[in-house]
Image: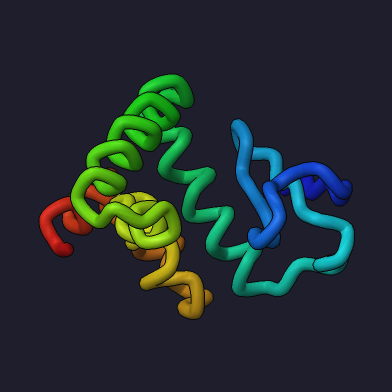
Amino acid sequence: MKIIYNKYLPPKGYAAINICGVIFARSQYKPISERTKRHETIHTQQIAELLVVIFYLWYGIEWIVRLIQYRNKKEAYRNISFEREAYTNDQDDTYLKRRKLYAFIRYLKKV
């Protein structure tokens, strides 16, 4: 897993962002925690399952829907199905070994 530390990505307030399987992390968080690595690795699996473009389209559309639903940017972000799966399981170092394909779908209905 490639991690690029910099001062621009992700936006302030976030430690890391996964773009096409490459993790960009703010320099102030160097080195990122194992939990953050697991979180971003879960996103890498999601990205691969949805063939990159579909993942980012789905992510953006779901964020807009959640923004309308919650009327709060951070709450909308935390309730995107991809984020719910990653945050729920990023403390479990065995999760990726037993994760089923398209596991994020079960997090769509939970609000």
Query: How many numbered marks have been drawn onto this rendered protein structure?
Result: 0
Q: Look at 56% across and 54% down and name the residue there.
A: 41
**What colour scheme has been applied to the protein in the rendered image?**
rainbow
Note whether 68 is above or below 38 in the view shown: above
User: Residue shown at 46%/78% (left/top)?
Assistant: 92
> In the image shown, does 14 or 56 lie closer to the viewer?
14
Q: Is residue 3 above or below residue 22?
A: below
Residue that protrudes farthest toward the left in the picture: 109
Q: Which quarter of the image is occupied by the C terminus?
A: bottom left
Residue 47 at x, y percent in the picture: 46, 36
Give the left or right position of residue 6, taking residue 18 as reference: right
Residue at the extreme top: 53
Judge from the rendering whether residue 15 lies leftward or rightward of residue 44; answer left or right: right
Q: Residue, x 36% and y 56% (percent of image)?
A: 72
Question: Which of the 4 quarters of the picture holds residue 18?
Answer: top right
Q: Position of residue 2 (x, y in %)?
A: 77, 45
**Farthest residue, direction front:** 71
In the image, residue 58 sits, relative to residue 109, either above or below, namely above
Please state the horizontal and vertical placement of residue 89, each as a whole percent of the image.
41, 71
The quarter of the displayed image where residue 31 is located: bottom right
Q: Position of residue 93 (x, y in %)?
A: 52, 75
Look at the picture and state if 100 lies above or below 33. above
Residue at (57, 64) in percent of width and height: 38
Looking at the image, residue 107 sits to the left or right of residue 77; the answer is: left
